[in-house]
Image (cartoon, grey):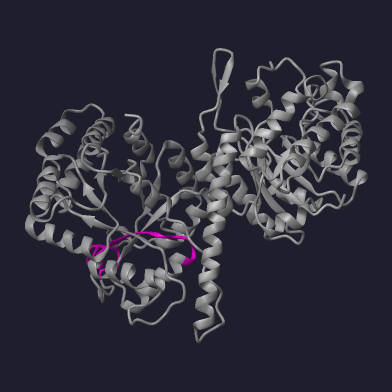
């Protein structure tokens, strides 16, 4: 038959099926059976699993031949039935595909041999090549549309499998997927870049990742693979098939925690990461695939609508040189706040030099600790540091942790304000915290200029009313509108309460999406502020993230209280720090107490660690989302 699988991939994303092994287990098959042998002994069970994925909307079915090689079948005394089992596997998948009225492709599944290759084991590269060739020859003759190598942990082993496939059929599309651990490397320590480089040398059609971990952990791997794929001549496509989270054993059953809805949400993010084949691995079910199908169909519908509207605009416009804008999804922060999820944010200062390596590693650790978003301060305390939006871009690119860019108006004229904002948006930075900023007189360069053309509320109005609508401050078109999510500062300890409430109201009316406060130690002023606002204007219409700061020591607490006018520590807080035998631990305890109280009033917490003590920040939020 003619194979147009690659042409289909180039037209748009293909949805693969989900788990086979765990689905067979759900049908009552124990893991001490040869799951591949079921192709001969219980074909109807295998066929029903395929049918479930067809009904869920899968475009690509994998044959039940993951372990159908001589070494694995030897464990069940089936080593002489390699050909029969593989042929039956293709026949069953093809039957399920043909029963549908849609075009569904069949990929021959090839897994690792189940034995270690030299030098880690005793199997030579030649023996591995021979075993793979034996299986692949049968799959090819049985008429698969592609071969999918999956869950390989040894790069040398998958190389032998690919070489065997090329010797059998030089034109059969190849999908090569490695498995990765939580640290983003294969179990044998190869990075995604090293894997991509080797697989690209072998000119496979698709490189990807599957199994081992859930969507969130596998997404950065696929981003790295996608980046490398764009930089090489062969330009392979990218695939991703994660597990349904990390399994937990309950009695004799393995329970996978990730829900279909969670996979549906990640399907959109996989597309944004550049994936062309999207599916599931262990623990995923037809319900997971159905949710991903719905998400992909929704994205395709939005894309087609955007293209149609863009074409109409292009025909009517005088300048016909631009392309239709790409539809952008809301930021993760915007989505979480809209769903009224409690958000955890942390503030980080950019480095004094030009290297961001340490802070990128810090970002990875903070993400693992449970923080949702990282706020990047801009010249805090008016001290010279790396540009905040450079660090924000690097953090998002290298860690997939979303950032909030602090954007002070002080020291920027209107021309620079708009240019910097457009540059940030082009780099994928779309969460902003607009503020006045610290005056240069308090920092390293007191002689620096302090001019500004716009105040924070005015900048919020400019962003939400003009830039997000595709115009600059003069009303001149900038092409596609930006999609900034804009936050503002709020002070719960103002010298003039009425004035602060009116200023806050002005920011909200200007279009602010959320607010962030200075550190809070006593929630009483917060309750007073919110009540006074309600009395005048009704409920606060935007979510607020309350600031939390764990004092590092008594001396630090006294400095904060006496030398920073925007931070006020109650006397009881200072007294506790004086009596504490360990100031750091007491500071963390005070911050956690404040956080728990704020959780009842506000929609998020904004942790400001002192002296780069990010370990203290992680301790502050420990368990907060479950609490």
**Image check: 120 left or right of 219?**
right
Residue pictured at 76% horizontal, 54% vertical: 6
Where is residue 145 drawn, in percent x and y? 81, 46
Residue pictured at 22% horizontal, 53% vertical: 541
Q: Where on the picture, by quarter, is residue 147? A: top right
Where is residue 33 drawn, in percent x and y? 75, 16
Residue 620 falls inside the magenta stretch = no
> Vertically, is 275 above or below 144?
below
* Residue 496 visible, this orientation: no
Q: Which residues are magenta?
A: 426-446
Q: Where on the picture, by quarter, is residue 237? A: bottom right
Where is residue 187 drawn, in percent x and y? 67, 33
In terms of depth relative to the viewer, which is nearer, 276 or 74?
276
> Vertically, is 530 above or below 288?
below
In terms of depth relative to the viewer, which is nearer, 191 or 226?
226
**Number of numbered discs on residues:** 0
> Vertically, is 454 above or below 490?
below
**Image check: 165 left or right of 343?**
right
Residue 443 falls inside the magenta stretch = yes
* Residue 359 visible, this orientation: yes
Residue furthest top in the image:
251
Where is residue 65 drawn, in percent x and y? 79, 31
Quadrant position of the C terminus in the picture: top left
Residue pictured at 68% horizontal, 26% vertical: 21
């Amino acid at each position: 038959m003619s194979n147009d699988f690659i042409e289909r991939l180039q037209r748009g994303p293909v949805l693969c099926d989900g788990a086979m092994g765990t689905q067979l287990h759900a049908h009552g098959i124990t893991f001490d059976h040869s799951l591949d042998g079921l192709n001969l002994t219980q074909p109807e069970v295998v066929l029903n699993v395929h049918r479930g994925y067809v009904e869920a909307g899968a475009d690509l079915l994998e044959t039940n031949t993951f372990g159908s090689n001589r070494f694995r079948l030897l464990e069940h005394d089936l080593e002489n039935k390699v050909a029969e089992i593989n042929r039956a596997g293709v026949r069953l998948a093809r039957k399920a595909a043909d029963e549908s009225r849609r075009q569904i492709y069949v990929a021959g599944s090839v897994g690792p041999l189940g034995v270690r290759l030299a030098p880690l084991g005793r199997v030579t590269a030649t023996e591995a090549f021979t075993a793979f060739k034996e299986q692949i020859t049968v799959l090819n003759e049985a008429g698969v549309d592609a071969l999918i190598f999956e869950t390989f942990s040894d790069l040398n082993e998958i190389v032998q499998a690919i070489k065997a496939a090329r010797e059998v059929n030089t034109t059969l599309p190849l999908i090569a997927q490695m498995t990765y651990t939580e640290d983003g490397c294969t179990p044998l320590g190869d990075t995604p870049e090293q894997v991509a480089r080797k697989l690209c040398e072998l000119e496979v059609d698709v490189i990807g990742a599957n199994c081992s971990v859930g969507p969130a952990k596998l997404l950065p791997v696929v981003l790295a693979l996608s980046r490398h794929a764009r930089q090489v001549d062969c330009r392979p496509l990218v695939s991703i098939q994660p597990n349904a989270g990390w399994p937990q054993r309950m009695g004799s059953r393995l329970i996978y925690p990730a829900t279909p809805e969670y996979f549906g949400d990640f399907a959109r993010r996989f597309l944004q990461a550049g994936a062309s084949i999207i599916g599931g691995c262990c623990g995923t079910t037809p319900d997971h695939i159905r949710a991903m199908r719905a998400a992909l169909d929704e994205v395709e519908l939005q894309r087609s609508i955007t293209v149609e509207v863009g074409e109409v605009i292009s025909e009517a416009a005088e300048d016909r040189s631009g392309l239709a804008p790409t539809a952008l999804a809301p930021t993760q922060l915007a989505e979480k706040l809209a769903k009224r999820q409690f958000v955890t944010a942390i503030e980080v200062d950019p480095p004094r030099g030009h290297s961001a390596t340490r802070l990128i590693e810090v970002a990875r650790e903070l993400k693992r600790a449970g923080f949702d978003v990282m706020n990047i301060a801009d010249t805090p305390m008016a001290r010279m540091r790396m540009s905040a939006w450079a660090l924000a871009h690097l953090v998002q690119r290298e860690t997939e942790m979303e950032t909030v860019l602090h954007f002070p108006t002080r020291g920027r004229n209107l021309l620079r304000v708009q240019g910097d904002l457009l540059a940030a948006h082009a780099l994928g930075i779309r969460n902003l915290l607009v503020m006045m900023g610290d005056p240069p007189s308090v920092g390293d360069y007191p002689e620096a200029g302090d001019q500004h053309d716009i105040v924070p509320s005015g900048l919020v109005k400019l962003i939400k009313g003009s830039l997000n609508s595709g115009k600059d401050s003069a009303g001149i078109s900038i092409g596609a509108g930006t999609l900034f999510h804009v936050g503002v500062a709020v002070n719960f300890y103002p010298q003039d309460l009425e004035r602060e409430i009116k200023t806050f109201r002005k920011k909200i009316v200007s279009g602010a999406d959320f607010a962030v406060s200075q550190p809070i130690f006593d929630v009483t002023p917060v309750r007073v502020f919110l009540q006074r606002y309600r009395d005048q204007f009704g409920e606060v219409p935007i979510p607020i993230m309350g600031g939390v700061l764990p004092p590092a020591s008594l001396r630090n607490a006294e400095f904060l209280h006496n030398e920073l006018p925007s931070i006020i520590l109650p006397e009881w807080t200072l007294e506790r720090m004086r009596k504490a035998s360990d100031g750091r631990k007491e500071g963390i305890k005070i911050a956690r107490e404040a956080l728990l109280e704020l959780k009842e009033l506000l929609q998020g917490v904004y942790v400001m660690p002192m002296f780069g003590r990010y370990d203290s920040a992680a301790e502050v939020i420990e368990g907060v989302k479950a609490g």
